[in-house]
């Protein structure tokens, strides 16, 4: 017998990634997102919007914190700019590479920025494993690097939100959970789940990935995608059925910002952001309506069952 449907919990908070606004000044990005009704922004640290190595970084962070507060926007900090540390090597160096201290330094800076901005998390991913390094040794290097960064996370009270990224060393939720075990289930180690990535590469259905990641879920990234093709698409251009996904996220309660990540939309960023929030609102309303109907149907079945049991009891009493 199926359990009754679970009533949906608190509304989702939708954000949008600054890596989809590469041709806008950061202050203008915040204006656009606030005007469109987004709840927050996923801020990628990079040369363009907020450079963590800028000489005047404290002033920039202070100004940004004021702007976020003025617009009523939440924020999560991300470190996935692909060529930020190496102009030739995508996502290099990694925590598994020779020269991993550069990645550690960036993540430590990101944690300090996150604390100053009020972001509860810093996003990161594994990048590729170094060539010639056995898998077991790569895991040891990655866990050691994450452990070092977690010491700084403890200082600032900001969690790491590790994202499984297609075709990287940690490319699935299961491998991310394995990393969590390698760092002894540290309370500040969490997961960023990208819905499109899950559809692209995971063996499990997307809804199962949501449930699998749920105990450690800190952030969600969202976009449409096709199976086996790692290309971030606008909603409706891929294969994902979003209302059940949003319903599953709602049932978790607080899953952090649910942030749109469509990096290829920068040339039409305001329009892509507008279409995205309109789609997500409609899909979310559909999820709520479907769940409400399921609860009402379950209640009606329960009432009919109770009435039937009562009538049977009365009939039995009358025959005594």
Image (spheres, rainbow, N blue to C red):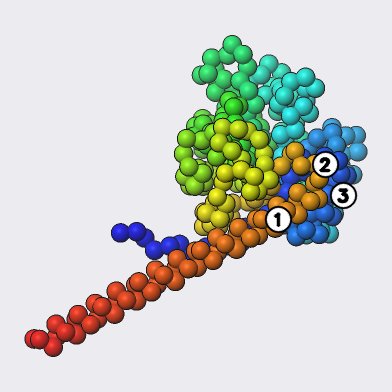
Kindly report the distance in space between the C-alpha atoms of the residues bearing marks 3 and 2. 17 Å
User: Which residue is pictured at 44% across the width and 68% down the height?
Assistant: 295
Viewer-proximal residue among 76 and 112 = 76
**Mark 2, other Cα within 10 Å: few <14 / some 14–19 / many ≥20:** some
Res. 18 visible in picture: yes
| Quarter placement of the C terminus | bottom left
- Where residue 112 sits, quadrant-wise, is top right
Instruction: Look at mark 2 in the image and give the residue it sits on.
Output: 267
Kindly report the distance in space between the C-alpha atoms of the residues bearing marks 2 and 1. 17 Å
Q: Are marks 3 and 1 in contact (CB under 8 Å)?
A: no
Instruction: Look at mark 1 in the image and give the residue it sits on.
Output: 277
Viewer-proximal residue among 289 and 123 = 289
Which callout, 3 or 1, points at the residue further toward the start of the chain? Answer: 3
Viewer-proximal residue among 173 and 166 = 166
Q: Is residue 155 left or right of residue 198?
A: right
Q: Is residue 186 left or right of residue 71?
A: left
Kindly report the distance in space between the C-alpha atoms of the residues bearing marks 3 and 1. 20 Å
Q: Is residue 50 left or right of residue 75?
A: right
Q: Nearer the viewer, mark 2 or mark 1?
A: 2
Res. 114 visible in picture: no
Instruction: Look at mark 3 in the image and give the residue it sits on.
Output: 27
In the rendered image, residue 86, in percent from the top left (x then y), is placed at: 78, 22
**Mark 1, other Cα within 10 Å: few <14 / some 14–19 / many ≥20:** many
Residue at the outermost left position = 320
Q: Are marks 3 and 2 in contact (CB under 8 Å)?
A: no
Which callout, 2 or 1, points at the residue further toward the start of the chain? Answer: 2
Secondary structure at badge 1 equals: helix
User: Which residue is pictured at 14% across the width and 82% down the height?
Assistant: 316
Viewer-proximal residue among 232 and 89 = 232
In the rendered image, residue 182, in percent from the top left (x then y), is placed at: 51, 30
89 versus 248 height, above or below: above
Which callout, 3 or 2, points at the residue further toward the start of the chain? Answer: 3
């Amino acid at each position: 017998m199926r359990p009754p449907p679970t009533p949906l919990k608190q509304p989702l908070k939708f954000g949008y990634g600054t890596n989809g606004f590469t041709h806008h000044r950061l202050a203008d990005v915040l204006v656009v997102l606030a005007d469109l009704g987004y709840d927050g922004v996923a801020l990628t640290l990079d040369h363009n919007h907020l450079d963590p190595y800028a000489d005047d970084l404290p002033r920039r962070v202070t100004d940004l914190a004021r702007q976020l507060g003025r617009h009523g926007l939440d924020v999560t900090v991300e470190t996935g700019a692909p060529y930020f540390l190496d102009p030739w090597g995508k996502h290099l160096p990694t925590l598994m590479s020779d020269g991993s201290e550069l990645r550690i330094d960036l993540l430590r800076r990101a944690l300090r920025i996150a604390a100053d901005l009020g972001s509860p998390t810093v996003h990161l991913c594994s990048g590729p494993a170094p060539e010639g390094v056995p898998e077991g040794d790569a895991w040891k290097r990655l866990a050691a690097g994450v452990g070092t960064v977690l010491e700084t996370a403890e200082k600032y009270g900001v969690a790491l939100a590790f994202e499984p990224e297609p075709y990287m060393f940690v490319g699935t939720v299961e491998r991310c959970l394995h990393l969590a075990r390698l760092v002894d289930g540290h309370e500040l180690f969490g997961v960023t789940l990208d819905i499109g990535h899950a559809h692209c590469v995971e063996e499990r259905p997307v809804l199962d990935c949501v449930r699998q990641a749920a105990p450690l879920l800190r952030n969600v990234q969202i976009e449409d995608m096709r199976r086996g093709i790692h290309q971030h698409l606008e909603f409706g251009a891929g294969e994902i059925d979003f209302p059940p996904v949003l319903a599953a996220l709602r049932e978790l309660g607080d899953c952090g910002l649910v942030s749109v990540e469509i990096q290829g939309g920068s040339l039409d960023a305001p329009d892509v952001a507008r279409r995205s929030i309109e789609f997500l609102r409609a899909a979310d309303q559909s999820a709520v309506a479907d769940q409400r109907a399921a609860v009402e149907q379950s209640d009606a079945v329960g009432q009919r069952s109770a009435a039937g049991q009562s009538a049977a009891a009365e009939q039995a009493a009358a025959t005594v």
